[in-house]
Image: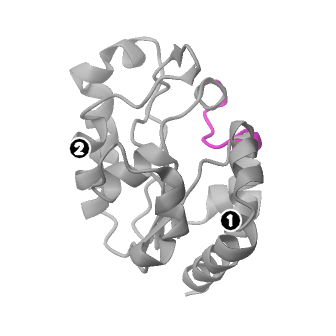
């Protein structure tokens, strides 16, 4: 068993995840030793948990479009890893899914990233991922982070969550698609062809 497989088993055995493991639910993420790009999101939704496929919804379709990657490449390329801040569906809240559990990413991202030494770009999807990886205050506005995306390059690329719930944000920020997405697609294409 290699180290990535060992970590997967350790995550399942962690008491924090015991309730999921007892129900036969495995952690949902993707880690490849050859990965150049790591997509960091919030946590799997209920649809992902049931289908065992992350980003398997309209948000995923939009994200793949933003990245300039087709569905097959997204799920099968070893140049792409997916590490949400929590590898399990955290449950439903009053206005959508609950946030990722505290302490989860702190515990599991570092050992996994040690096994992926070639990552050059973290695509940070949504405010939780941005604030965690960029060490920003919780009061920092998502729009400000994304408008200033060039300040975080070449290692980090912050994105608004591609959920249909953010259609209002996209309508209020018409600069996002023509100004930000071409830069994202270009960077992703460069790393995917190496």
Number of numbered discs: 2
Q: Is residue 54 above or below residue 125?
A: above
Q: Residue at x 60, y 41 (%)?
A: 54
Q: Nearer the viewer, residue 172 or 188?
A: 172
Please identify the quadrant where the C terminus is shown. Answer: bottom right
Q: Secondary structure at mark 1?
A: helix
Q: Quadrant of residue 184?
A: bottom right
Identify the residue position indicated by label 1 in the image: 176
Q: Nearer the viewer, residue 22 or 167?
A: 167
Which label is found at residue 46? none
Q: Residue at x 71, y 68 (%)?
A: 175
| Dot 2: element | helix
Which residues fall within the magenta stretch?
A: 50-59
Which of pointers 2 and 1 indicates the residue nearer the eye?
1
Question: At 67% from the left edge and 66% from the top edge, which residue is drawn?
Answer: 67
Q: Residues within 10 Å of mark 2 (few under 14, many from 20)?
A: few
Q: Report the residue at 65% width, 82% height from top.
A: 186
Image location (x, y in percent) of residue 161: 60, 47
Q: CA distance from mark 2 to mark 1?
A: 30 Å
CB under 8 Å between callouts 2 and 1?
A: no
């Amino acid at each position: 068993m290699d180290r990535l497989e060992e970590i997967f088993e350790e995550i399942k055995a962690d008491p924090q995840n015991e309730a999921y493991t007892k129900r036969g639910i495995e952690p949902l993420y993707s880690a490849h030793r050859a990965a150049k790009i790591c997509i960091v999101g919030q946590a799997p939704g209920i649809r992902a948990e049931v289908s065992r496929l992350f980003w398997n919804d309209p948000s995923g379709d939009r994200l793949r479009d933003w990245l300039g990657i087709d569905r097959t490449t997204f799920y099968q390329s070893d140049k792409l890893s997916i590490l949400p801040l929590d590898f399990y569906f955290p449950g439903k809240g009053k206005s959508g899914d609950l946030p990722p559990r505290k302490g989860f990413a702190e515990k599991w991202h570092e050992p996994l990233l040690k096994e992926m030494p070639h990552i050059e770009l973290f695509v940070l999807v949504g405010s939780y991922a941005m604030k965690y990886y960029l060490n920003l205050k919780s009061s920092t506005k998502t729009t400000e982070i994304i408008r200033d995306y060039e300040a975080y390059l070449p290692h980090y690329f912050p994105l608004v969550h591609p959920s249909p719930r953010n259609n209002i944000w996209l309508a209020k920020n018409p600069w996002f698609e023509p100004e930000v997405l071409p830069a994202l697609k270009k960077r992703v294409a460069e790393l995917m062809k190496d």
